[in-house]
Image (tube, rainbow, N blue to C red):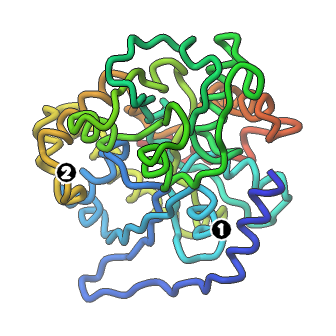
Amino acid sequence: MKKFFAIILSTLLMILPLSACKNTSGLKTIQLNEVTHSVFYAPLYLSIENGYFEDEGIEIVLTNGGGADNSMTAVLSGSAQIGLMGPETVIYVNNQNKQDAPKVFGQLTWRDGSFLVSRNIDEEFSWLNLRGKEILAGRRGGVPAMTFEYIMKELGLINGVDYNLNFDVQFNLMTSAFLNGTADYCTVFEPTASEYEKEGKWKVVSSVGAQGGEIPYTSFIALESYIRNNQETVKGFLTAVKKGIDYLFTHTERDVAEKIIEHFPLTSVESIETSIKSYKNINAWKNTLSATEESFDLLQNVMIYAGELNEKVDFTKLVDNSIANTL
């Protein structure tokens, strides 16, 4: 936790807050920083492509943080008003007793969105195959790595004893590191997981989300002051995202793929369609945007087991469901 916050503070010193972008359309601009770019966030891209944000008087400027620490830094510095990232970041910052603390105001996914891949394309997989192996599953203290470690604990396997998690590779560099020979297994998001399997580079052997069950995985986060001072904008933002979720649940995977293809210009419609099916199969997306206290309690249990949290933080300090509950 201290390392996470130190990274944020040092990065903040190098970032100048961006002033609110102005446009000639009369829309209010929101700088939105996403932790990574993935089909996992399909409802967000649907809301952009279908004009749902414009319907609410909002223009989205989307940037990629390449990691939760960078996305949280963007929110704290003011270079982004909203971040889409793991809610563990809110817990870390709140434990520093920051006055204008970030809060979760909407939850998009409630399963781990990564898939475990192996270079052995003929492998008959069992989770116990990971005994004695090295795995790339994300940075230390991030939800992906902590969730993975907790899953393994439930299977009776202990990191550093029965297997080894490699925390040394940055989140957005894991795929290339794995393809270049680092570790025995790697966790990968869609559409990369399906695309590279199709090319014969690896085999998707399991879904981490299906194995791990419900956990607050990716959330919309903003400073308390921003939520308080921009109630109508935040409501409009969540309303637009909810419309994207509703579209996803009421249309075919092909319809969704064709709508969001511009967000993945190097990926085929067929691959995105496969990715959407994969995420639907594991029930990755919530049909409501409010977060539950029970799921955050589990998240904090996961963090405590990973050695990243000493004691739990009160749910009301982490989450503001006041707007999400009205939708």
User: Residue at label 2?
Assistant: 267
Q: Position of residue 215 (x, y in %)?
A: 57, 29
Q: Position of residue 234 (x, y in %)?
A: 47, 60
Above or below, comparing residue 234 to residue 79 in the picture:
above
Q: Are marks 2 and 1 in contact (CB under 8 Å)?
A: no
| Residue type indicated by callout 1 | Ser
User: Residue at label 1?
Assistant: 225
Q: Residue furthest front?
A: 181
Q: Secondary structure at mark 1?
A: helix
Q: Position of residue 110 (x, y in %)?
A: 49, 32
Q: Secondary structure at mark 2?
A: loop
Q: Residue at x 30, y 45 (%)?
A: 42
**Quick check: can you spot residue 118?**
yes
Q: Residue at x 16, y 34 (%)?
A: 253
Q: How many marks?
A: 2
Q: CA distance from mark 2 to mark 1?
A: 39 Å
Q: Residue at x 58, y 33 (%)?
A: 135
Along the line of sight, which residue is nearer the eye, 248 or 105?
Answer: 248
Along the line of sight, which residue is nearer the eye, 133 or 269?
Answer: 133
Q: Residue furthest right?
A: 310
